[in-house]
């Protein structure tokens, strides 16, 4: 399960055709375990994108059920989907909504990409599509099937031997 953080970055951007600088705030999405790791990754990755000095002004957890990247597409869209679950105990239907982040060219493309990515999800319906302020997404790994050893250790509880070794140090 991904933990996603939206990092707002503030910096001075040159105005085209002039010598002036304009202060801008931009939002980038990072896959990280903690707020601290998200901030660290922002300071590591954003110099590739932003020229000059910048400051991370805010970090907040993002609540996206899934991120659907693409080789093509210029804008990130928040696609709200809704589907029906049936409660096993009571037998009642329950409508559940989630938001998916999709990289696409336009709204129609965002809907199509979402439908393609979620084709194995039974009976869902697209409820709303809005353009997001997010400019780029930085996944933890380029291939999500590879998990670094230190990241896996951070997600599992310590064993009895590890606890005993930590007490003896």
Image (cartoon, rainbow, N blue to C red):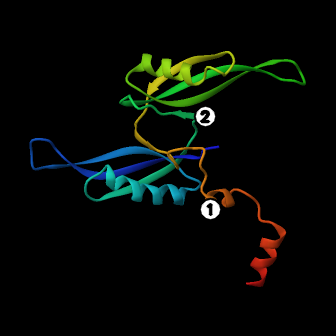
Q: In the image, what residue occupies the spot 62% across and 57% down? A: 151
Image height check: is 133 above or below 57? above
**50, 73: nearer the viewer:** 73
User: Secondary structure under badge 2?
Assistant: loop
Q: Earlier in the sequence, mark 1 or mark 2?
A: 2
Image height check: is 130 above or below 154? above
In the picture, the disc for residue 150 is 1
User: Secondary structure under badge 1?
Assistant: helix
- Looking at the figure, which quarter contains the N terminus? top right
Mark 1 or 2: the one toward you = 1
**148, 69: nearer the viewer:** 148
- Looking at the figure, which quarter contains the C terminus? bottom right
The residue that label 2 is drawn on is 65
Image height check: is 107 above or below 56? above
Residue neighbourhood size for the residue with mark 1, other residues' Cα within 10 Å, grouped as few (<14), some (14–19), many (≥20): few
Q: In the image, what residue occupies the spot 77% across and 65% down? A: 158
Locate residue 42, reporting x and y percent.
43, 55
Relative to residue 61, is residue 13 drawn left or right?
A: left
**44, 57: nearer the viewer:** 44
Locate residue 93, reporting x and y percent.
79, 17
Farthest left residue in view: 18
């Amino acid at each position: 399960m991904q933990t996603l953080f939206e990092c707002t970055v503030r910096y001075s951007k040159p105005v085209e055709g002039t010598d002036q600088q304009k202060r801008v705030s931009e939002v980038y999405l990072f896959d990280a375990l903690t707020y601290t790791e998200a901030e660290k990754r922002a300071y590591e990755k954003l110099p590739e994108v932003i020229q000059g000095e910048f400051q991370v002004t805010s970090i907040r957890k993002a609540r996206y059920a899934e991120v659907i990247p693409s080789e093509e597409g210029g804008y990130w869209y928040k696609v709200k989907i809704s589907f029906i679950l049936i409660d096993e105990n009571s037998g009642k239907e329950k409508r559940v909504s989630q938001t998916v982040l999709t990289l696409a060219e336009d709204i129609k493309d965002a809907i199509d990409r979402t439908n393609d990515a979620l084709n194995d999800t039974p009976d869902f319906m697209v409820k709303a599509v809005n353009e997001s302020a997010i400019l780029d997404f930085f996944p933890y790994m380029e291939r999500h099937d590879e998990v670094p050893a230190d990241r896996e250790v951070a997600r599992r509880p310590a064993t009895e031997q590890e606890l005993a070794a930590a007490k003896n140090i």
